[in-house]
Amino acid sequence: MDADRAEGTRAKAGGPEPQRDKKKLNRSFALMTALGVILVLAGLVGLVYTGVATLTSMFLFGWLLLIGGVVGLLQAVQARRSNYFWLAVVVAAINLAAGFVILRRPEASAEALTMFAALLFLTAGVFRLVGALVVRGANCGLAVVQGAFGILLGFLILSSWPGDSLYVIGTFFSLALLFDGLSLVAMGMGSRRILGLVREDEAPAGAAAADGAGEAAAKRPAEDQEQSNN
């Protein structure tokens, strides 16, 4: 009976359920790594063909606005008795109009977004630079460098606007894909490595637990026999 119990403990330590869960996790991490590789390749291709990447990002942005506008309009119709019905309708209509304009005029939309990005860099850089000089915290030097870099980047974009508008958005979009893909690859590979280490550690631990259960089961009949003799 005790030997059967020890065998059951050993079977639980390396049973099919934990192995199945580990296989699922391993498969998920492998898919994460594959997705990261695809994003890295897309980012590299986008950096080579920045004009195509800009137009692609504009079309994606336009379709997202159209889909968001349709979904918002359907939600507004479903909640037509609420107090925010007309506000939801106006927001949905703005999304639909913006998506339609971007899909009809992607080059002009890229110029407008490039101007907006340049102004955003300038504004954020000025606020960060002034805040760092006024507060003078622990990371004052880093904040000053970031603020100055934002101002410089904004001026560089504005100096070549609208001539380079077809390349700025595509470059940013490709860099975002590249860094997101690298982070996914690093997370997937690191997680698979950690899962392999856990798998190696659990095997000796399960064997030690099973051996301990077997020793306890072997000692128990001897103790019971001593008590009966006394």
Image: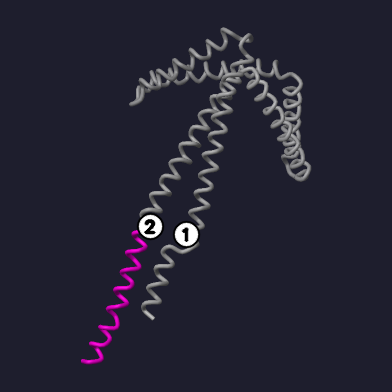
The amino acid on which the numbered mark 2 sits, given as a three-letter code, is Glu
Label 1 vs 2, first from the N-terminus = 1
Location of residue 84 by image quarter: top right
Residue farthest to the left, as pictured:
230
Foreground pick, 28 / 165:
28
Q: How is the image coloured?
A: one colour
Give the residues drawn in magenta, as a range. 202-230
Q: Which residue is mark 2?
A: 202
Location of residue 128 by image quarter: top left
Q: Which residue is mark 1?
A: 18
* For the residues bearing labels 1 and 2, Cβ distance under 8 angstroms: yes
- Give the structural element (helix, strand or loop) at label 2: helix
The amino acid on which the numbered mark 1 sits, given as a three-letter code, is Pro
Residue 124 locus on image (x, y percent): 50, 20
Q: Is residue 226 found inside the magenta-colored segment of the image?
A: yes
Q: Is residue 137 above or below residue 38?
A: above
* Residue at image coords 58%, 19%: 48
Residue farthest to the top, as pictured:
159
Distance between the Cα atoms at labels 1 and 2?
10 Å
Which is the main secondary structure of the residues drawn in magenta?
helix
